[in-house]
Image: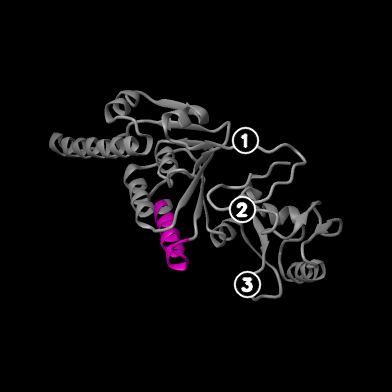
Amino acid sequence: MFCLFCLPFTVNRLLPTLECNHFSKQRLVLNRGKYRQFVESLSSWKRHHKYATLGNIAMGGGVPKVPYKAPGQQNYEFIDIFNRFYRERIIYIGQEIDEDQANQIIAILLFLQSEDDQAEVQMYINCPGGFVTPGLAVYDCMCSVRYPIVTVNLGMAASMGAFLAAAGTPGRRFALPNSRYLLQQPLAPDNIKGQAKDIEIEAIQILRQRDMLFESYAKFSKQSIEKIKQDSQRDLYLTAYEAREYGLVDKVLTPRPKGLVMKSTGVGEPIL
């Protein structure tokens, strides 16, 4: 079964493979003779944790949890999937980009910069859009860090999601075959009100941000600003292949045939 949560991990990096949904029936396939150590860690965790089944670990009524062993530690611990992603230099954007979401992404980008300013970061995107100002803050941070950023559109990259997906390091922007992109002009906030002059000031600011987006899109895609403006008069939906022709994507990733075991091809391309 194709599992998005397992998407970023290669076989060599993720030791356990769980083939059943209950501790009493699960079969563990581990690399490098770690079976006994992993089972002891699971048993210890089960005795002291409120969850009792692997199904609850996977979902838990909230954020999924996965096993992880920190360097130098003997036992595994269960951490939420996003925490595990961050430790693997992976960022997942799966909701609207607002101030809180943007601040979290920026904090992670800066932390990863302090950890290693050369190792790449993979950014997986399935985003319905968001606000322009927070999105531009994330974009500026992406431009300021030294390490390359791989972007992958998993499903829908709309508005600011499309902008960030296209803002990845040139040559390292990917999309799945059935993913889509949506380019559109920035919308006016719902809370704009006041005197006519106040509304005019807000309108000028929106037009200024629109021009900033168009200029950046032109740089990403090698399209002219005039064409970007014309195409964005109304919502522009693009398939992954159309986005590649447009210049927003470098490569469309096709799923490997079932039963085929693939090894890592090195940095710069996610393993699917």
Which residue carries the number 1 mark? 254
Give the Cα distance between marks 2 and 1. 31 Å
Q: Position of residue 22 (x, y in %)?
A: 81, 55
The crowding category of the residue bearing disc 1, from other C-alpha atoms within 10 Å (few below 14, some 14 to 19, many at least 20), is few
Q: Secondary structure at mark 1?
A: loop
| Residue in the image at 52% along x and 40% along y | 174
Q: Quadrant of the N terminus?
A: top right
Which residue carries the number 3 mark? 71
The crowding category of the residue bearing disc 3, from other C-alpha atoms within 10 Å (few below 14, some 14 to 19, many at least 20), is few
Query: Is residue 9 covered in magenta?
Result: no
Please name whichever residue, 227 or 16, is drawn nearer the observer in this view of the structure.
Answer: 227
Point out the frontmost of discs 2 and 1.
1
Give the Cα distance between marks 3 and 2. 27 Å
**Relative to 70, does residue 272 appear above or below in the rendering?**
above
Lower position in the chain sequence, tag 1 or tag 3: 3
Position of residue 114 in the picture relative to residue 42 (left or right): left
Look at the image and give the residue range highlighted in magenta: 102-118
Mark 3 and mark 2 residues within 8 Å of each other at the beta carbon: no
Q: Do we see residue 70 in this rendering? A: yes
| Residue in the image at 23% along x and 35% along y | 207
Position of residue 150 in the picture relative to residue 256 (left or right): left
Q: Secondary structure at mark 2?
A: loop
Point out the frontmost of discs 1 and 3.
1
Residue 62 tag number = 2
